[in-house]
């Protein structure tokens, strides 16, 4: 049984990433006692970000820069929050044939995240 999920990402500039996740995506930024790491937390989602200034930027990974699909309970409101805060929307909010309402964005580091909500039929 998987009890929870967490994501581990490499970022080039930890301070810039922390500001992005806090100001654009409305995540809480948690210090963990290691200056090279921060946890970005929202509800039951935890993204563990490690500063790796010499790593290949996520934006250079193409389709491999997707790292998460996060399911929400009010995708319309969250989409408007992210859009109003200046988030880079890659896929506008729309209903998909597979029964999900989705949008995608690119973070300041070039990581891509898909957000979805099951549609009521």
Image (tube, helix red, strand yellow):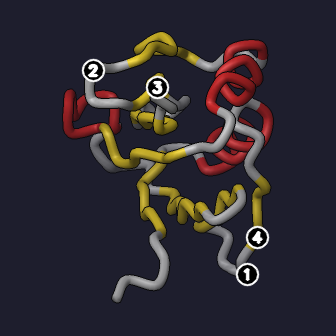
Q: Residue at 72%, 17% (x, y): give it.
A: 80
Work out whether 32 lies above or below 112: below
Asked if marks 3 and 1 touch (Cβ < 8 Å), the reply is: no
Outermost residue on the front side: it is: 121
Residue at the spot of label 1: 33
Residue at the spot of label 2: 97
Q: Which mark is residue 71?
A: none
Q: Quadrant of residue 20?
A: top right
Q: Residue at 48%, 69% (x, y): give it.
A: 6
In percent of width and height, residue 60 lies at 25, 29
Q: Residue at 31%, 39% (x, y): give it.
A: 66
In percent of width and height, residue 17 lies at 62, 42
How far, Cα to Cα, is label 4 from label 3?
Answer: 33 Å
Asked if marks 4 and 1 touch (Cβ < 8 Å), the reply is: yes
In percent of width and height, residue 23 lies at 79, 34
Q: Quadrant of residue 24?
A: top right
Which residue occupies the foreground of this view, 29 or 12?
29
Q: Which mark is residue 101?
A: 3
Disc 4 is placed on an element classified as strand
How far, Cα to Cα, is label 4 from label 2?
Answer: 41 Å
Q: Which mark is residue 31?
A: 4
Asked if marks 1 and 2 touch (Cβ < 8 Å), the reply is: no
How far, Cα to Cα, is label 3 from label 1?
Answer: 38 Å
In the picture provided, is 15 more to the left or to the right than 97?
right
Which residue occupies the foreground of this view, 111 or 101?
101
Could you tell which of marks 3 and 1 lies nearer the N-terminus?
1
Which residue occupies the foreground of this view, 35 or 46?
46
Work out whether 116 lies above or below 84: below
How far, Cα to Cα, is label 1 from label 2?
Answer: 45 Å
> How packed is label 1: few (under 14 Cα within 10 Å), some, or many (20 or more)?
few
Work out whether 18 lies above or below 35: above
């Amino acid at each position: 049984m998987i009890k929870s999920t967490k994501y581990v990402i490499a970022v080039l500039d930890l301070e810039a990433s922390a500001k992005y996740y806090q100001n654009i995506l409305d995540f809480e930024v948690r210090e963990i006692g290691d200056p090279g790491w921060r946890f970005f937390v929202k509800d039951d989602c935890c993204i563990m970000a490690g500063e790796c200034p010499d790593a290949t930027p996520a934006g250079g990974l193409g389709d491999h820069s997707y790292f998460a699909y996060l399911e929400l309970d009010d995708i319309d409101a969250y989409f408007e929050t992210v859009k109003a805060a200046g988030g880079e929307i890659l896929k506008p909010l729309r209903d998909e044939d597979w029964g999900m309402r989705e949008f995608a964005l690119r973070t300041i580091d070039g990581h891509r995240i898909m957000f979805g909500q099951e549609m009521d039929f």
